[in-house]
Amino acid sequence: MAQHNELGKKGEDAAVGYLGQKGYKILERNWVYERYEIDIIAQNEEFIVFAEVKTRSSDQWGNPEEAVSKGKIKRIVEAADFYLNVNDIECPARFDVVAAIWDGQKFNIDHIDDAFLAPVN
């Protein structure tokens, strides 16, 4: 596995741990619909949360969350819509971004609730 893939997997593991500590129930990891992937699907007391995890070894080139493009948002929303429909979930949905930056010893996590809204066609 390439080094950046290993870092990304570790960042996702750290994000799952962080969300678990905040009381989220992790429903799915790396859930795939067609060619779209949702990193983490979780639930808290109010929402089903679709979380995109962005991991970096530093913030030298900007914050990790800035790497969530409009195209990525569109794909996440489409996959989330399918997930909600196929699982007959009526709970309100929210889209979060979890930014994980490795400082050489641990991950610094920035959890951005409601990071984006579903685009209107």
Image: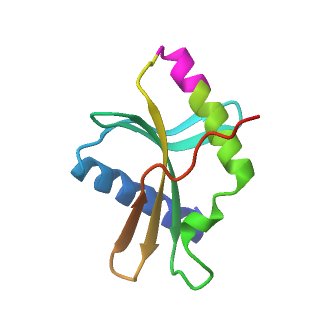
Main SS, magenta residues: helix
Give the quarter of the figure containing the C terminus.
top right
- Please provide percent x and percent y for residue 88: 48, 14
Please give the range of residues in magenta.
82-88
Q: Residue at x 24, y 50 (%)?
A: 22
Between 117 and 38, the one lying in front of the other is 117
Q: Residue at x 58, y 44 (%)?
A: 117
Magenta span has 84? yes
35 relative position to 53: left or right: right
The residue furthest front is 120
Residue 103, picture quadrant: bottom left
Q: Is residue 63 above or below residue 91?
A: below
Q: Is residue 81 above or below residue 26?
A: above
The residue furthest bottom is 60
Residue 64, picture quadrant: bottom right
Give the quarter of the figure containing the N terminus.
bottom right
Magenta span has 107? no
- Please provide percent x and percent y for residue 90: 44, 18
